[in-house]
Image: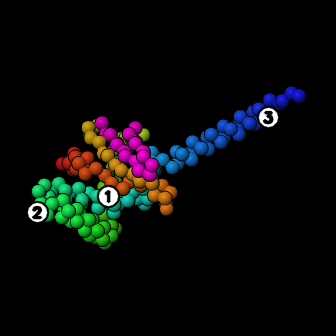
Amino acid sequence: MRRSPLIFLLVALLLGVLVAGVFYYRHRHSPRYALHQMALSLTNRNYDNFYDYVDLAGIVSHLMEETGKALLAPNLPGGNFLSQFGFKMGGRVVRHLFESFEREFRKLAYQYFDTLTTQELLALQGAVALADISQKGEEAQVTLRFPEKDTRLRLTMAWNSQQRRWRVVSVNYEDLKALLNRELW
C-alpha cells in the first residue's frame, strides 16, 4: 500500500505548528518578552502598561534598604540583629509611605519618560534585545548595557503567578546611582 505525500505534508505541517506554538508560548512567558513589552510601552508612551511589568513598591523598598546599608556604620552596637530589625521595620514603613505617594511618584516618572528622545528609546530597545538574562526558576537576573554611556543596569525579575508575567522587583543600587549621576549631572 502506497502512502500519499499529502498525508506526509499534513503531519509535517501539524508538527511544525506544534513546535512553533511551544516556542511562542515559552517566549511569551520569558523575562525577555517582559523587557520588550516594557520598552515598547515607553516607546508608545503607554506608561500604565509599563507599570504592569514593574513592582514599584518593591523596588523603592529595596533601594531604601540598600541606601540604608550604605549609610550605616559597619560596627553598630547590638550587632547584625539590630541592623536587620531596623531594615525590616524600615521596609514596612517605606511600603506604607510609598502607597501614599505612589500617584505623585508616577506623575514624576511620567514627566521624565516624556523627555526621552527617540535616540534614547532606541538605545533602550537595543539594550533590551542584547540583555544578559540568567533565569533560575521563577527569578531572573538581568543586565542591560548602555555602551554610549558606558554604564549598565542590573535588575532582578520575578514571575508573578497571579498576573502570569515577569515583573522587575529590584534594581541594583550602585548601577542606578551611577546611571542617575550620568543622566542628571
Please provide percent x and percent y for residue 156.
Answer: 36, 50
Q: Nearer the viewer, mark 1 or mark 2?
A: 2
Residue pictured at 34% horizontal, 42% vertical: 144
Under circle 2, the secondary element is: loop
Check if residue 162 falls in the magenta segment: no
Under circle 3, the secondary element is: helix
**Badge number at residue 7:** 3
Q: Earlier in the sequence, mark 3 or mark 1?
A: 3
Residue pictured at 29% horizontal, 37% vertical: 148
Check if residue 143 falls in the magenta segment: yes
One can see residue 31 in this view: yes
> At label 3, which amino acid type do we have?
Ile
> At label 2, which amino acid type do we have?
Pro
Under circle 1, the secondary element is: helix
Q: In the rendered image, which quarter is residue 93 located in?
A: bottom left
What's drawn in magenta, residue-wise? 130-147
Residue pictured at 36% horizontal, 56% vertical: 169
Q: Earlier in the sequence, mark 3 or mark 2?
A: 3
Q: How is the image coloured?
A: rainbow
Please provide percent x and percent y for residue 43.
Answer: 42, 49
- Mark 2 closeness class: few <14, some 14–19, many ≥20 residues within 10 Å: few
Q: Nearer the viewer, residue 38 or 91?
A: 91
Quadrant showing the N terminus: top right
Residue 138 lies left or right of residue 28; in this view the side is left
Residue receiving disc 1: 59
Measure how far apart labels 3 and 2 are at the Cα level.
78 Å
- Mark 3 closeness class: few <14, some 14–19, many ≥20 residues within 10 Å: few
**Badge number at residue 77:** 2
Q: Nearer the viewer, mark 3 or mark 2?
A: 2
